[in-house]
Image: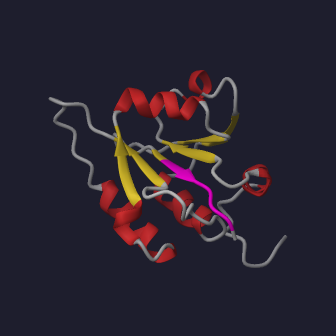
Amino acid sequence: MLKNIPAVLSPELLKVLCEMGHSDRIVIADGNFPAESIGKNCKVIRADGHGVPELLDAILTLFPLDTYVEKPVSLMQVMPGDKAETPIWEEYKRIVKKYDSRGEAAVGEIERFAFYEEARSAYAIVATGEKAVYANVMLQKGVV
């Protein structure tokens, strides 16, 4: 056991967060995200019993966001014509604001298929059991 480490962070996820370097990216994926097929060339960590907000909050307690890019937090944009609502994004923005002085300004959106392409080159993908739609979030690591 370690002190001050959020319990939701598994040893495998802690190891990955530690291994990552400046500008590496990690995707925290919802339950619909094709983590195994998109993540063929990266590390896929299963966190099926957890939601994205709790993992995002726990990860950001340890993970510095990149200050050299304008939007180190990326959300998967809703497809035009899709009636999906994304109230979970407001929760993400509140969480980011707790850990980054840029707050909501650090959060951007990436078109759905471009998000998939970016995710293919991520260092890791965390596959969660999140049921909200368009709940995927990509973080770019900064320096301590």
Q: Is 38 positioned to the left or the right of 115 in the image? A: right
Q: Is residue 142 magenta?
A: yes
User: Residue 40 falls in which quadrant of the image?
Assistant: top right
Q: Which residue is at 26% across, 55% downward?
A: 87
Depicted 46 relative to depicted 88: above or below: above
Depicted 41 relative to depicted 4: above or below: above
* Residues in magenta, as a range: 138-143
User: Residue 37 falls in which quadrant of the image?
Assistant: top right
Q: Which residue is at 69% across, 59% downward?
A: 9
Q: Which residue is at 43% across, 56% downward?
A: 71
Residue at the outermost right position: 1
Near-viewer residue (127 or 131): 127
Q: Position of residue 20 (x, y in %)?
A: 73, 51
**Is any part of residue 46 visible from this angle?**
yes
User: Residue 94 falls in which quadrant of the image?
Assistant: bottom left
Q: Position of residue 49 (x, y in %)?
A: 57, 47
Q: Which residue is at 72% across, 78% downward?
A: 4
